[in-house]
Image (cartoon, rainbow, N blue to C red):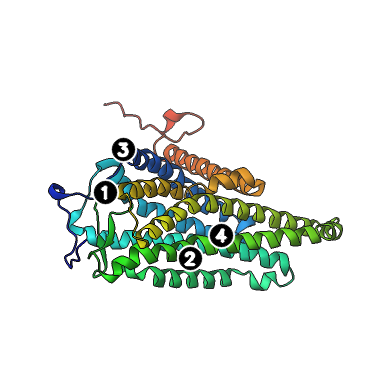
Amino acid sequence: MNTTNNSITYDPSVYTGPSNSPVVVLLYRYGLGFIFLFGFTGNLASTATFMQTTLRTTSTAFLFLILAVSDTLFLLVSIFDFIEVGLTQGPILLTNYDSLCRFRWFMKGFTQFCSAWILVFVTIDRWLRTRFPFKANKWCSHKNVIIVTICIIIIGIGLHSHMLSAQLFGKFFPGVATVACGPVQLWAPYTLFFFVQWPFIQVFFVCLIPVTLMLLGSIDIHRTIQKTKSRIQTVAMNQPQQLRQARLHRQMLILMISSIMIFFVTTLPVSIRQIVAAYAIFANTAINENEIVNDTAILTILLSFNYAINFYVHCLTSKLFRDEFIKFIKIMYRLAGRTTGDNINNINHNVLPLTANGNPQANIPHQQPRT
């Protein structure tokens, strides 16, 4: 392959790069459509549920609330792929494609990083409450959650900032899933970094390290709970407040474990595929571009489920979460009924005639007979 310093341009008449398979097009059209329908609804419901009085007092619920916001941002950015690959089946907005590429790829990587590390700190939060219950209220506070979130945001921006450079990043193969954007110059040092080194960095920081920390934390939490279970039951037997706290702690653990399982199942396959592809490029072995692109695109759909189904899994696994969600629905139903009742009263007051002595005709002015 020859070295060139020319920026990549999109010309359909001479296009010879990878393309989307019919399976990828169908998955992006119907798969992402399904994910958006249930994902936005579920994340909105999660946000409302974690803001309920019982849950919002805990730092864990506050972290889950931030996680729902991060997941929603990822889905919002993915709408472009849904339109371009699934609906129009070709590049759109080519005039501003470079700027859109920088924004989309940065936001995707950034939100994936934030969601992964928020889950890590959910695990750390529960671990601290299990290991150091008497210091948990001091350490696991809303203020510290905000500080941790700010740190995650700063590190995430720094890690993905190279994608915001107009000299490095832009359109690559417009309209093709997973490779629509990339280095703006072929065979520059950044190209080697992006296709060989960056996948390893991304997988380690977004998948392997978070999963390892979550698993270690979960194992230690389980061991600690088993050691102290009988003692806690004896002390809290006649103390309702202690029982409520233990139930809340148990339900938060269930939410944490279910979220970790979703994260592990949805992110690991695409991470393994990225590492295999990066190694093949590094080893300079024969590769099938279409196979890599389409495999990664299919696994990306699976990855997108991670940002859409947390609410539904929480409802299935946690009775407390279900109860709080049902409570929220009842509150909204009462508010809607009250609003409807107020509107009807206003209509009756403004439109229907007032009665006097039970006779509505009494308020109708009678025409005086002519003399």
121 or 177, nearer to the observer: 177
Q: Amino acid at mark 1?
A: Pro
Q: Which residue, given by chain and number where applicable, does mark 1 sit on?
A: 18
Tell me the mark number nearer the camera, choosing from 4 and 1. 1
Query: Which residue position holds label 3?
Result: 22
How far is the residue under mark 3 from the one under mark 2?
32 Å
Amino acid under disc 4: Val
Mark 4 or 2 closer to N-term? 2
Q: Quadrant of residue 9?
A: bottom left
Foreground: disc 1 or disc 2: 1
Residue at 36% x, 54% y: name it: 77
Location of residue 70 in the rendering, given as x and y in whole percent from the top left corner:
46, 59
Q: In the rendering, at what x and y percent does residue 60 appear?
A: 61, 61
Q: How many marks?
A: 4
Residue 27 in percent (x, y) is at 37, 40
In the visual, does 25 lie left or right of 339? left
Mark 4 highlights which residue? 211
On the rendered image, what quadrant is the C terminus found in? top left
Looking at marks 1 and 2 on the same chain, the residue that comes earlier in the sequence is marked by 1
- Crowding near the residue tagged with mark 3, few <14, some 14–19, many ≥20 C-alpha atoms within 10 Å: few
Q: Earlier in the sequence, mark 4 or mark 1?
A: 1
Instruction: Look at the picture and state if 363 lies above or below 159.
Output: above
Within-10-Å neighbours for mark 2: few <14, some 14–19, many 20+: some
Instruction: Kindly identify the residue that appears in the image at 46 percent across and 43 percent down.
Output: 38
Determine whether, in the image, residue 361 is placed left or right of residue 178.
Answer: right
Residue 122 appears in the rendering: no
- Between 279 and 85, which is closer to the camera in this rendering? 279
Q: Which residue is mark 2?
A: 205
Three-letter code for the amino acid on which mark 2 is drawn: Phe
The amino acid at mark 3 is Pro
- Please state the horizontal and vertical placement of residue 248, each as a whole percent of the image: 69, 56
